[in-house]
Image (cartoon, rainbow, N blue to C red):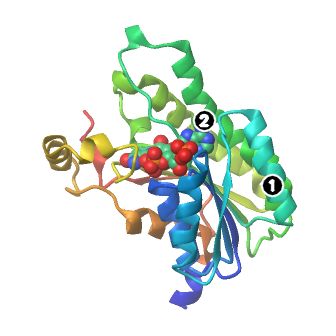
Amino acid sequence: MLEKLYSMNGKVCAVTGGSSGLGSYMAQGFLEAGATRVYITARSQDKLEAKAEELSALADGECIAISGDLSSIKGIQALTNELKENEKHIDVLVNNAGIGTGGLFADMQPEVWDMTMDLNLRSPVFLTQALLDLLKAKATYEDPARVIFTSSVAASENNTQVMAYSTSKSAIEKMTPLLALALCDDHILVNTIAPGAFYSEMTRNTWEDPDRLQSLIERIPAHRFGELEDIAGVAVMLCSRAGSYFTGEVLNLDGGHRLTFG
Ligand SMILES: NC(=O)c1ccc[n+]([C@@H]2O[C@H](COP(=O)([O-])OP(=O)(O)OC[C@H]3O[C@@H](n4cnc5c(N)ncnc54)[C@H](OP(=O)(O)O)[C@@H]3O)[C@@H](O)[C@H]2O)c1
């Protein structure tokens, strides 16, 4: 039974921000669980193609790169068009591309606020909307399609240094049950993963600095950063038979990090 529970055999998936970090970990998990095709997207084409080649070599399924900027509606439409040219349906959409912004409130620039909201909040909403036909195409009660959003432990934290980022991620969490209800009759399950500190490009400045790494690890109850297996495992669970009774849920994948906020 276990093999069937966590199998993604035959699935077609799309993972935004798949060229590095969490997106690449989830894409790898899907391929190793048997997905037939996993599309990964990001802006930098060279990096994206190198990652697609690397991941394709790990399993029988194919990892395919589609480059583009998802912070604009035009970029969302371009990705949608390309996916529609290639596929008649999609089983899994992971809205993961995101930007981490921060700084003092007094210095906050409207451009930075907009950039954060455009990529972290508007893009996942309207990419999901644009791909609804593909998500609905093969979805059934027995085998629903899945949409996953990537929030952050920052949504649970009152850190004034990351106001725009936290607000964008909180909004994703608020939207999760709303979208789950809106899409339930289309047999689409909607859930959010809220990661804590993971190794990725976004957190490089922290984990490359031994003092910052040590002080953060001391604060996290699990006493370590999150790794590939941590998020790949949860993403595969949510997108396989094992997770098919979850919808409208936010899964805090943070080693207990949020419990330490005062
Ligand atoms: N790492 C953590 O500890 C952590 C914790 C909580 C939440 N998160 C969330 O996890 C998600 C992934 O972050 P990560 O940590 O894995 O960071 P990462 O390694 O920097 O990956 C970000 C990905 O998004 C892509 N991307 C960035 N801007 C884009 C744009 N405008 N259009 C399309 N793609 C874009 C990047 O590629 P290009 O730059 O080439 O476009 C890359 O593939 C984000 O939503 C982040 O907020 C991360």
Q: Tell me the CA gap for discs 2 and 1.
A: 19 Å
The front one of 130 and 170 is: 130
Q: Toward which corner of the image does residue 86 lie, by quadrant?
A: bottom right
The front one of 63 and 88 is: 63
Q: Tell me: is circle 1 under 8 Å from ligand 1.
A: no
User: In the orientation shown, which residue stands out farthest toward the front?
Assistant: 46
Label 2 or label 1, whichever comes before in sequence order: 1
Instruction: Tell me where residue 193 appears, x and y as whole percent.
Output: 50, 53
Image height check: is 11 above or below 20? below
The front one of 121 and 87 is: 87
Count up the numbered dots.
2
- Residue drawn at (55%, 91%), measured in percent from left and top? 1
Residue under circle 1? 82
Instruction: Tell me where residue 137 appears, x and y as whole percent.
Output: 86, 65
Image height check: is 196 above or below 234? above
Does 37 sit left or right of 194 as displayed?
Answer: right
Neighbour tally class for label 2: few under 14, some 14-19, many 20 plus, Cα within 10 Å: many
Residue under circle 2? 119
Q: Secondary structure at mark 1?
A: helix
Does 83 sit left or right of 148 as displayed?
Answer: right
Q: Tell me: is circle 2 under 8 Å from ligand 1.
A: yes
The circle on residue 17 is none
